Amino acid sequence: MRVGIVCPYTWDVPGGVQAHIRDLAEALIADGHQVEVIAPAADDAPLPFYVTPAGRAVPVPYNGSVARLAFGFLSANRVRRWIREGRFDVLHVHEPFVPSLGVLACWAAKGPIVATFHASYQRSRALSVSAPVLQSAVEKITGRIAVSDAARKTLVEHMGGDAVLIPNGVTVGRYAEAEPLPGWDEGEVIGFLGRMDEPRKGLPVLLEAFALLAPERPELRLLIAGPGDADEVMEKVPAQFRDRVGLLGMVSEEDKVRAYHSVDVFCAPNLGGESFGIVLTEAMSAGAAILASDIPAFRRVLDDGQAGALFETGEAASLAREAAALLDDPARRAKLSDEARTAVWKYDWSTVARDVVRVYETVASTGGVEEDDRP
């Protein structure tokens, strides 16, 4: 099957949707399908062989974060040419509510179009205002996938209709084994992976909890990976404990895996706005003992606390208390690790990609995807 996948966010800045699309594309290719991806990216950006750049992205505030999107004449022309030349059996757009390449692709194409909805939010003024404009694109979609119940609810409430529930995937084997990062194989280590400057990722809550724990735990250290301003992060840490905080910044895929294997407790202190939690499934694949905020998406992935401990969302004291309990109980950490390694297999791409292909087969037609030449 020839599959064209449309990524709404810039390829060169890591994110959950980009990782989802990358892993889906590679799983489909491994199964013998022909796959092409188009994504916002500069022409000189280093890209996998299957990714076509659609032009530089611009940062836009969106859903409590900053999304880097492409939406303009250059991108529209590139999307239209990519569709015309691709001769795809099915077009798979991601986040068609986002004003980026997914909307442009829906406008430019006709035929079998599948959409995956990732985001979850209660109310969106921007989406309510733009709904009439988006409707002309969304009505072309012939198959819908939601990665979580929360994302499915968002779709139903804002646009109507329904979707097949297929969770995010993870390549479990990629994270299973790795050596710890140099210097991080001793003492007590709590880890964090995410954008340091994005409030909803909850890093300030973790920093506050660390300040509560550090005076009583001289061997405790904090390992932080992800983009953001290191100086701003350090300003939130009491001066006497700053030498116990490691800031890796952006890390390669290899070092990300090693980071998961460098911690005694992996912490996901997110405040909300998450529909799934790909960072959790990565940590679960690595067998990390996980401590996460008690938001619905995380509770679901962690099987209501069976595959990872939970703390009261946004409460540093609760985080500190639960982290201390885990650090003091190696047997419980080992049990959580075993439960996580078992539970995560239902999210492996070997299973998830096959479910996605079933949706493709449901909507596929003999005519395939064509350029829509209507104005």
Image (cartoon, grey):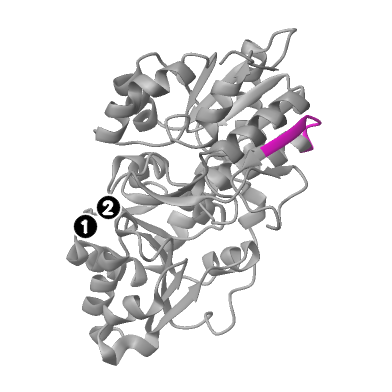
Which residue is found at the position 41% from the left and 23% from the top? 134
Which residue is found at the position 72% from the left and 35% from the top? 36
Give the left or right position of residue 165, taking residue 237 as reference: right
Can residue 300 be seen? yes
> x, y (%) of residue 137?
48, 20
Decide: is 146 above or below 71. above
Mark toward the start of the polypeptide (1 vs 2): 2
Give the left or right position of residue 326, taking residue 346 as reference: left
Magenta-colored stretch includes residue 306: no
* Closer to us: 87 or 362: 87
> x, y (%) of residue 281?
50, 48
Q: Give the range drawn in magenta.
A: 30-37
In which quadrant is the C terminus drawn? Answer: top right
Can residue 218 be seen? no
* Closer to us: 215 or 236: 236
What residue sits right under mark 2 in the picture? 271
Hey, which residue is sitting farthest right in the picture?
32
Residue type at numbered disc 2: Leu
Q: In which quarter of the image is residue 333?
A: bottom left
How many residues crowd mark 1 within 10 Å: few (<14), some (14–19), many (20+)? many
Magenta-colored stretch includes residue 32: yes
Local secondary structure at mark 1: loop
Decide: is 362 above or below 258. above
How many residues crowd mark 2 within 10 Å: few (<14), some (14–19), many (20+)? some
What residue sits right under mark 1 in the picture? 314
> x, y (%) of residue 171?
63, 46
Q: Which mark is residue 2?
A: none
> x, y (%) of residue 79?
64, 33
Which residue is found at the position 34% from the left and 28% from the top? 130
